[in-house]
Every structure is written in structure tokens, then in C-alpha cells.
């Protein structure tokens, strides 16, 4: 009896090791394929490469803002140089309070990127995992989660965010919560659709036949195969959230003053002095446009890379 149990245990261990080895090899092969395809895409898709470069420039500028601004402070006021035109001293001019516009735009990128990446990181991850669970398990779990998603998606996105911000109040953390609530159901529905297709694949059935648990199938087989879709979706959400945060700040519901928010730079004084000091509108607007455009171009490039209906011969 003991010998039989030992033999059965040894076979189970060997089967588990073999399955783990195949899974690891599959993940390594997939990572290699994606990296090779990304290099080809950046070489063949100059717009995608330009989008990635724009995003990288803003990320680096935000992280190293004290160095990039060359000592200029975004909060320092000097009324003697108010509304100064762009010059060698103030590259992008100053606002009505004499604050350096270049420094405020660079520091403003920190806020926009922090809000966007945090909201997508929390809400996107929650939607990713919930979509996998919903699509793979099905049954009452899927029905319950999808009804919650239907309720949240029944509201227009901007209206839902305005309602949440009105209830929670203004501030970076409040905006992150509102955007997280918006991103979770959208991500969940798209990922669920992918999972419903993937779980019918032969390798999933094979893993089930070999005794793999549901959690193992979801983490080791389903998750790696929906990551491409998730990354493309994440880039789209990042660009959208940058624009949404700017919209909320423009309406006075976003980041409170004196924080250098891009959207707030376009309201108030910028509107009052738009004709006499057009740089107050042009440069913050250009910053928003360039970052959103960068995310969108890079997202389109990733879609061309990983969508078999669109990629053609770009990547294997």
C-alpha cells in the first residue's frame, strides 16, 4: 500500500514538473516572440516609434523634473515678470503671476502621469483578473460580475466621473478612485471576451485532463495569452485618462491649486489673457496633445503587432 502511494506520488510530481517546464518554456517563447516583434515594429512603424519616444520623453522629464527645469520653481511668483513672452530666461514665458510656464508644464506632467498610471495600474489589473475569473469560471460568478459591469457601463464615462468627483471631492487620490471605477468594467468586459475564446483551446483542455486546477489554468495559461490585449488596452486608457484629468482640472474639479495641472493652466488666467499672452494656451495644450498622441500612436503600433488580423508580416 505504501509502495503504491509512493509510486503514485512520484508520478504526480513528475507530471507536475513536466507541466511546469512546458508552461515556463511557453512563457519564455512568447516573451521572445513579443520582444522580437516589438523590435520589428519599431523599425517598420515609425509612427509607433515616435509615439513611444514622446511618452518616454515626458516620463523622463517628469521623473527628473528638478534637473530638467534648470532650477526654475513651478510655484515661485514674481509679479515683476508677469506675462513675460518666451525668452532665454523663461523658455515658454510666464503666467499672470510671474510663474515660469516651462517649469509648471514639466512638473504638471508628473501629476498627469501619476494619475493615469495609478488608475490604469489599479483599475486595469482589477479588470484583468476579474475578467479572467468571470470568463473562465462562468456560471453564477460570470452572471453576477457582468451585471455589475452592465450597471457601471450604463452611465456615460464623463458623467460617471463627474458624479464621483462631486461626491468624493477634488484631489489626486479622488481622481484616481474615479478613474479606477471607470477603467475596471471596461477592461473586464474586453478581457472576458478574450478568455471565453481562449478557454476552448486544445491546450487548456489538455491541461485540465492532466489535472491542472482552475487557478493554475488561469494564471499559467489564460493570463499570458490575454496580456497582449491588456497592454494595448492599457495604452489606450492611459491616453484617455490624461485627457480626462485635464478636462476635470479645466472644469475646476481636478487637482486643486496651486498644483501645476495642465488642465487648470488652460482655464482662468489662460482664457482671460488668451489674446495678449497666447503662450498660456498654446504650450499647455501642446503638452496634453503630445502625450495623448504618444500613447495613441504607441497603442496602435502594439495593436498592429499583436492582432493577427492587422499585423500582416510585421511580427510572427
Image: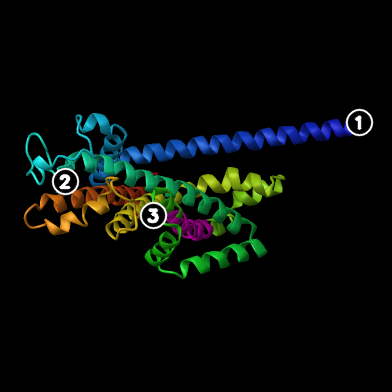
Tell me which segment is drawn in magenta: 178-194
Is residue 68 found inside the magenta-colored segment of the image?
no
Residue 14 screen position, x and y as percent:
72, 32
Q: Which residue is mark 1?
A: 2
Badge 3 marks a residue whose secondary structure is loop
Badge 2 marks a residue whose secondary structure is loop
Badge 1 marks a residue whose secondary structure is helix
From the viewer's side, name the closer residue of 229 and 20: 229
Left or right, 62 with respect to 177, comes to left
Q: Which residue is mark 3?
A: 170
Which comes before the other along the chain, label 3 or label 1? 1
Residue 179 screen position, x and y as percent:
42, 55
Up the image or down, 197 lies above or below 78; here it is below
Residue 12 screen position, x and y as percent:
76, 36
Nearer the observer, disc 2 or disc 3? 2
Using a 10 Å C-alpha cutoff, classify the residue at mark 3 as few (fewer than 14 neighbours), some (14 to 19) or many (20 or more): some
Left or right, 161 with respect to 209, comes to left
Q: CA distance from mark 3 to mark 1?
A: 67 Å
Which comes before the other along the chain, label 2 or label 3? 2
Q: Which residue is mark 2?
A: 97
Using a 10 Å C-alpha cutoff, classify the residue at mark 1 as few (fewer than 14 neighbours), some (14 to 19) or many (20 or more): few
Amino acid at each position: 500500500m505504501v509502495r503504491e502511494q509512493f509510486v503514485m506520488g512520484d508520478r504526480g510530481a513528475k507530471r507536475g514538473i513536466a507541466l511546469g517546464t512546458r508552461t515556463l518554456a511557453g512563457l519564455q517563447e512568447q516573451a521572445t516572440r513579443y520582444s522580437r516583434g516589438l523590435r520589428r515594429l519599431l523599425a517598420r512603424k515609425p509612427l509607433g516609434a515616435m509615439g513611444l519616444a514622446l511618452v518616454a520623453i515626458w516620463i523622463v522629464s517628469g521623473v527628473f523634473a528638478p534637473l530638467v527645469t534648470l532650477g526654475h520653481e513651478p510655484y515661485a511668483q514674481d509679479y515683476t515678470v508677469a506675462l513675460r513672452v518666451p525668452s532665454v530666461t523663461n523658455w515658454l514665458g510666464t503666467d499672470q503671476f510671474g510663474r515660469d510656464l516651462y517649469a509648471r508644464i514639466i512638473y504638471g506632467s508628473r501629476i498627469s502621469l501619476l494619475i493615469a498610471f495609478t488608475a490604469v495600474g489599479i483599475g486595469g489589473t482589477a479588470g484583468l483578473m476579474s475578467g479572467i475569473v468571470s470568463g473562465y469560471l462562468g456560471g453564477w460568478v460570470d452572471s453576477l460580475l457582468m451585471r455589475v459591469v452592465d450597471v457601471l457601463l450604463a452611465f456615460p464615462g464623463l458623467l460617471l466621473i463627474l458624479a464621483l468627483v462631486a461626491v468624493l471631492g477634488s484631489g489626486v487620490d479622488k481622481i484616481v478612485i474615479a478613474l479606477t471605477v471607470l477603467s475596471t468594467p471596461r477592461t473586464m468586459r474586453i478581457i472576458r471576451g478574450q478568455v471565453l475564446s481562449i478557454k476552448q483551446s486544445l491546450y487548456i483542455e489538455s491541461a485540465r485532463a492532466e489535472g491542472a486546477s482552475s487557478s493554475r489554468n488561469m494564471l499559467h495559461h489564460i493570463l499570458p495569452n490575454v496580456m497582449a490585449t491588456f497592454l494595448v488596452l492599457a495604452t489606450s486608457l492611459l491616453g484617455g485618462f490624461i485627457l480626462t484629468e485635464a478636462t476635470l482640472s479645466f472644469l475646476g474639479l481636478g487637482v486643486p491649486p496651486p498644483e501645476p495641472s495642465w488642465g487648470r493652466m488652460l482655464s482662468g488666467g489662460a482664457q482671460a489673457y488668451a489674446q495678449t499672452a497666447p503662450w498660456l494656451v498654446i504650450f499647455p495644450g501642446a503638452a496634453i496633445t503630445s502625450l495623448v498622441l504618444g500613447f495613441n500612436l504607441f497603442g496602435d503600433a502594439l495593436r498592429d503587432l499583436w492582432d493577427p488580423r492587422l499585423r500582416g508580416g510585421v511580427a510572427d
